[in-house]
Amino acid sequence: MTEIGIGIVGGGYMGKAHSVAMASVGAVFGTRLRPRLEMIAASSAESAERYRAAFGFRRAAPDWQALVNDPGVEAVIIASPQGTHREIAEAAFASGKPVFCEKPLADTMEDARAMVQAAEASGLPNMVGFNYSRTPATQFARKLIAEGALGDITWFRCEHSEDFLSDPATPFNWRCSGRANGNMGDLAPHPINAALALTGPIAKVSADLETVHAERPGGTVDNDDHAQIMCRFANGAMGHIYSSRIATGRKMGYAYEVFGTKGALRFDQEDQNALWLYEAEGPEATRGFRKILTGPAHPDYEPFCQGPGHGTGYQDQIIIEAKDFLEAIDTDQPVWPTFRDGLAVAEVVEAVMASAETGQWTEVRQ
Amino acid sequence: MTEIGIGIVGGGYMGKAHSVAMASVGAVFGTRLRPRLEMIAASSAESAERYRAAFGFRRAAPDWQALVNDPGVEAVIIASPQGTHREIAEAAFASGKPVFCEKPLADTMEDARAMVQAAEASGLPNMVGFNYSRTPATQFARKLIAEGALGDITWFRCEHSEDFLSDPATPFNWRCSGRANGNMGDLAPHPINAALALTGPIAKVSADLETVHAERPGGTVDNDDHAQIMCRFANGAMGHIYSSRIATGRKMGYAYEVFGTKGALRFDQEDQNALWLYEAEGPEATRGFRKILTGPAHPDYEPFCQGPGHGTGYQDQIIIEAKDFLEAIDTDQPVWPTFRDGLAVAEVVEAVMASAETGQWTEVRQ
Amino acid sequence: MTEIGIGIVGGGYMGKAHSVAMASVGAVFGTRLRPRLEMIAASSAESAERYRAAFGFRRAAPDWQALVNDPGVEAVIIASPQGTHREIAEAAFASGKPVFCEKPLADTMEDARAMVQAAEASGLPNMVGFNYSRTPATQFARKLIAEGALGDITWFRCEHSEDFLSDPATPFNWRCSGRANGNMGDLAPHPINAALALTGPIAKVSADLETVHAERPGGTVDNDDHAQIMCRFANGAMGHIYSSRIATGRKMGYAYEVFGTKGALRFDQEDQNALWLYEAEGPEATRGFRKILTGPAHPDYEPFCQGPGHGTGYQDQIIIEAKDFLEAIDTDQPVWPTFRDGLAVAEVVEAVMASAETGQWTEVRQ
Amino acid sequence: MTEIGIGIVGGGYMGKAHSVAMASVGAVFGTRLRPRLEMIAASSAESAERYRAAFGFRRAAPDWQALVNDPGVEAVIIASPQGTHREIAEAAFASGKPVFCEKPLADTMEDARAMVQAAEASGLPNMVGFNYSRTPATQFARKLIAEGALGDITWFRCEHSEDFLSDPATPFNWRCSGRANGNMGDLAPHPINAALALTGPIAKVSADLETVHAERPGGTVDNDDHAQIMCRFANGAMGHIYSSRIATGRKMGYAYEVFGTKGALRFDQEDQNALWLYEAEGPEATRGFRKILTGPAHPDYEPFCQGPGHGTGYQDQIIIEAKDFLEAIDTDQPVWPTFRDGLAVAEVVEAVMASAETGQWTEVRQ
Ligand SMILES: NC(=O)C1=CN([C@@H]2O[C@H](COP(=O)(O)OP(=O)(O)OC[C@H]3O[C@@H](n4cnc5c(N)ncnc54)[C@H](O)[C@@H]3O)[C@@H](O)[C@H]2O)C=CC1
Ligand SMILES: NC(=O)C1=CN([C@@H]2O[C@H](COP(=O)(O)OP(=O)(O)OC[C@H]3O[C@@H](n4cnc5c(N)ncnc54)[C@H](O)[C@@H]3O)[C@@H](O)[C@H]2O)C=CC1
Ligand SMILES: NC(=O)C1=CN([C@@H]2O[C@H](COP(=O)(O)OP(=O)(O)OC[C@H]3O[C@@H](n4cnc5c(N)ncnc54)[C@H](O)[C@@H]3O)[C@@H](O)[C@H]2O)C=CC1
Ligand SMILES: NC(=O)C1=CN([C@@H]2O[C@H](COP(=O)(O)OP(=O)(O)OC[C@H]3O[C@@H](n4cnc5c(N)ncnc54)[C@H](O)[C@@H]3O)[C@@H](O)[C@H]2O)C=CC1
């Protein structure tokens, strides 16, 4: 076992999640690289110090530059707002450090492309944070599809629905402004990533976006509340993606259905430890969707618990990410999803925005 | 109570269902008009006689013309293929008889429009068979929405998914040919009707159709296997409709979700006695989707059973239709959905076909 | 096809259900014997006349004696309170007529035993109304178990929970008095019948009964509100039965679980078209409870609908009973459950009452 | 913040879980006491060293005695087999250290009582590991009941069903011998604890136990496979508890239902992030069981994730235990469940064994 000094930029929602993950991943997965919580940075030295104490880091950084350049920091996790991702990532690669960057890769296509270039030029491990694809259930779904359990995919549907802005009386806040903070920037990347992971590249899209509650107490909203996307995949399959921040009653509605010639899968993140599988075989009378509870037979479950059906949770997804990032560093092998995979998601977002603008089917740049 | 002589054209899937419904509706609902199973017609005199005996009609008709013109037949139910609907309906109205016609109204727009004209010119009761909108759950959903329980509707999603052609090895049959027999002709009218009933008129659509399994043993398929439709409703709401006959594992996947500013509804016909309601009120900690079991507190349930949660089934929907048709005749009041409502569904189908052809958003003719 | 004159005693909850069933069973099942709704009796000639008109019978009987003795009545259905069952049944057998009797067979053990004797002495078809065992799902469950799909049964749990008396403020009514009207008399026979049907004879019981709300506005309750029963089956399996009329929130909570060495079944009547099957075979990773939707592949489903997943309801159970009763008459073969089977249920009730009294395990008289 | 040196005895299933919990609890909950993974002991020095390296402890102990007496160990967690609990706990209290002990408290009643005495005599914090009562859902259930949301409890049902020994071909192993390793010793304490926590003390029980598969490859089983318990609670409520290690298909079937005069709750650990609440209020037509997804509005959820519906898992329960144990130490306040609460569970087990022996209702020693 070898120690590795971890630096995290950001101590909010995701900064905390990655801190906890780095504190426990060694014990959970018995990784060869053992994280040392070396340094944390935030928007000010004061807040960094607060996070340091709270999460158990050795040192607080005055700013992200100091963190990235510190010799004790051997790998960087970026958990600050997307507008900051590019320069932090570029600086980290420049100083020879692997980077894990929260989704979405960047604010703009230009930034996202630059980040991929920097990552690939550096030859260093790079990874983007699509945590929902790391539940044991969804990893297993991906495996089943890859192995052909569903036959040829004919229909894919995915949604990511939450309701944090469903009440028109909720005041204007930072999420209400800027394309990257809108539903397409913030939520849609998750189901788009699911689409790519489960059904493969998307060839073209036709999309519709809407700002349902344009006026809120305190300001005028300038980004989208929800969006729908009709897709044609490269393999010919049809699909639909919906994402929303105004879906009253839906809390973590990351849900997908995949239909194929031989079977089907259904999943809803609100019940993340169940995967529903239908196999078109055996007597008609005993066919049905099977509620498979995750357990040691599924990817990355056993390290959390020897017992099937005991279940993993949100935080565990981040621990799995941490394990994969450490392994990428340790083995110097790329790990899905890389920055390039993050860019592929951004390209779909780009095509969606264009299609919504023109009302036309729009090809996705590969 | 007064007897009324019923004539049914067709003794297949739906012809039987309407025969049973007419045999029991009086006892179930205590209708004032009491059906007498007077006459049944089919594609031949022989098959008509077989149906007569099986279902308990007094007489078999040599053909539908004889049935329509028979003085003992006082109301006509059309349960023969859509290609036959127009002439039977026109003849029935011409001889002064109310008509119930199975969905879809007709094979072509021209026929559908002619049928509406004939119906309205006659001033006679006319009704089209969208049975799924008659479950106690869906009737109640419609009522809740109309009363404003969900606030303003922001998102509507509906599907009708079955899998009777999901296996590519299923041989070519009559369903594989002719627009009216394809998914858009056969299945899509149900969810489109749900959209209109629950969220109101659709202003425009953008749609995608596909024949997934074009070659089947025995022939080349010339109609669609599945289709998706993005909608904008007249009230501004966004929506999506999907229908499929190749959705492996889905048997009666008529399912909808309606999201509004104050609440949401979810329903799946595969569990037709449950309606899921979320109300955005009360303490956050006790909010959730509520599984409401149908019971005497819901429309048209109590005549089937005094006990809540005891449940109604497919056949009961047809009995409810029968009751409503008899009441329309008895009171001489139009009953939803009339032929005009059936035409409204057909207009959406028409716009969908055009949009799928051009890849453009297409307005729905109102 | 041959007509058969049906006489029904009682026009309340179940009297109506059997009337509707007899009106539609011929068309649904194509039975050889075709019911003619000949005569109905009730507690007075006036109410009988009201029911006659409502349900479409030819004649109203002044009292049950007239009905039983009428030559036009060729089979008798008893849907009057349990206190009346014995004398009506005995009279019917005496005049040579097959009898269908609603559950429970009788008010007292003595009556139940006398009824079995009368039935068997007459050699006439006799049947008791445990409708819940006639859903396609439960018939299929029984078949699966009988065929060994679950291996040896190790644990059986069943409940029948409703909440019509859960509110202590509900005034005293006729259900609150008399053993036969209490939970053990009224509800428990259903799950006990399920236990016998699915797992076989019960050898001994240990039970607990309780009147939770002894004082109600208008009177003192003298029968039980809920009861639980530990069982040992003749085949060695352990089991538990619970029934309640005060289970707040449960509407039709007739639910069972059957565990065996090779698999398990779960069912809840509140979702009567789904049967959950677990088979302990195949790779661990894809095992799970399968939600089987009823369809044409299951017993007695197809006559109601050709489409799987379209679902049957409460009234359909009674139609299936009607079909089985008519077939028993037509073929002169006994059909489960006979009066003797109804007595077997009563013997369990008797043992439960004794056990609850003494606090001891009590053997069930076979 | 202050560091505290933690010593853990055992590095198996639960030893690992507590190690991970202690590594992450500080970052998750921001506890004032910050665990330092000081020392781990196991059945040999070698295995202790292996665990040390794997989980990130500073030192491995040659045996538990060394650990308990080490000055760097300031609190002890016992995660070794129940036969060892007593002497380790007594030694730890003797050296002035707070103790967290895995369930069940001990192998025998005598040991359990001695441990309570030692704990209480020491005046030191002591806690027993009933992790399932620490999910946000179950903590919230307890709170709802305590606040009277269900009114008076009338019926409580709980089960803990797994299937790790459901296959009769599974060879004899250590779990197959010794009362403490049987279903009653191993699994039943969880649902019994739930009963006490949710409904209060149990006054008397009547129980049935069974060894279903007495002969296994490699040996004769001498403890129970499953057991059922009828209860009367001190508050008068009736209840039933079932536990099983042979419930084919059930993986983590810790499930309960609590019915009261004003409402009801249902929960199943296999879907641990959902709590089903029925409130008997408002219009009948919109009543139903509500699926409440856990979120920041529920106890101990927010530290894991700011988003509702994102879910917690098995490991998180142990982190919550760790937080509560640290707080008990920090504040010197007892925290439920103490050793005395663990003894209360053992007293019920004791009464169950006696009842199963005699076939009589048996009072529970309080
Ligand atoms: N994978 C997932 O499910 C989620 C991903 N995210 C992503 O994680 C990233 C962070 O989002 P949240 O944690 O929700 O934000 P947050 O607002 O909770 O935290 C942001 C943190 O970044 C720090 N920060 C801001 N500007 C900085 C600067 N210039 N230098 C250093 N630190 C700076 C702040 O001090 C704060 O600690 C975003 O890219 C977001 O899209 C967010 C939520 C969920
Ligand atoms: N509401 C619903 O859920 C459903 C509606 N339908 C609709 O019901 C109608 C009938 O469909 P199915 O019952 O499935 O068909 P089917 O093939 O089972 O039965 C058709 C019947 O029409 C009779 N028929 C055919 N040509 C005739 C003619 N020229 N004159 C008299 N009778 C003729 C046949 O003899 C046969 O009895 C169609 O419009 C269909 O779209 C069908 C299934 C479900
Ligand atoms: N299978 C099931 O799920 C159910 C079975 N039942 C059983 O059905 C039977 C009837 O119960 P309900 O229909 O609920 O009762 P109800 O009170 O709704 O109807 C009873 C009917 O019996 C008639 N009646 C009473 N005394 C009579 C007499 N001396 N002669 C002729 N008619 C008389 C009444 O006029 C009334 O029409 C009972 O044995 C009951 O246990 C009741 C409900 C459900
Ligand atoms: N709360 C819960 O859900 C669960 C609780 N448990 C309880 O946790 C305890 C441990 O069980 P598992 O972790 O499943 O067992 P295990 O067999 O996986 O691990 C037992 C550990 O104890 C160590 N050990 C054995 N004898 C020892 C000794 N004399 N001195 C020092 N270490 C010794 C072994 O080396 C091993 O590391 C038991 O009391 C069990 O009932 C177990 C599983 C689940």
Image: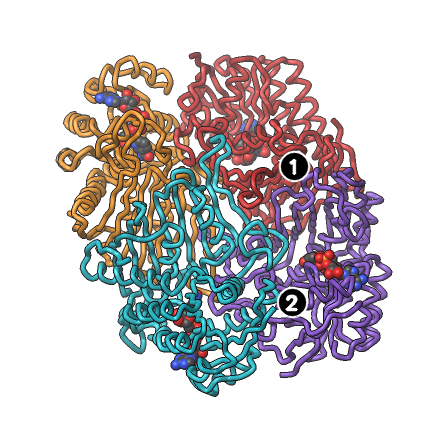
Chain colours: A purple, B red, C orange, D cyan
Could you tell me which chain the residue with mark 1 belongs to? B
| Residue C301 image position (x, y, % from top left) | 42, 41
Q: Nearer the viewer, mark 1 or mark 2?
A: 2
Please tell me which residue is depicted at 66% across the width and 76% down the height of the picture: A35
Please tell me which residue is depicted at 41% across the width and 61% down the height of the picture: D337
Mark 2 sits on what residue? A55
Label 2: state its secondary structure.
Answer: helix
Label 1: state its secondary structure.
Answer: strand
| Residue A125 image position (x, y, % from top left) | 75, 74
Say if D271 sits above or below D93 in the image: above
Q: Quadrant of residue C227?
A: top left
| Residue D187 image position (x, y, % from top left) | 37, 64
Q: Quadrant of ligand 3?
A: top left
The amino acid pointed to by label 1 is Gly
Q: Is mark 2 within 8 Å of ligand 1?
A: no
Q: Quadrant of residue D166?
A: bottom left
Mark 1 sits on what residue? B260
User: Considering depth in this image, is B333 or A356 the residue closer to the camera?
Assistant: A356
**What count of labels does the image hold?**
2
Please tell me which residue is depicted at 38% across the width and 38% down the height of the picture: D261
- Image quarter where the C terminus of chain B lies is top right
The amino acid pointed to by label 2 is Phe
Please tell me which residue is depicted at 20% across the width and 62% down the height of the picture: D357
User: Considering depth in this image, is D217 or C41 the residue closer to the camera?
Assistant: D217
Q: Residue B273: in sight, yes or no?
A: no
Say if B175 sits above or below C44 in the image: below
User: Considering depth in this image, is C142 or C266 the residue closer to the camera?
Assistant: C266
Could you tell me which chain the residue with mark 2 belongs to? A
Mark 2 crowd level (few <14, some 14–19, many ≥20, 10 Å Cα) = many
Residue D106 vs residue B173: left or right?
Answer: left
Mark 1 crowd level (few <14, some 14–19, many ≥20, 10 Å Cα) = many
Residue C230 vs residue B217: left or right?
Answer: left
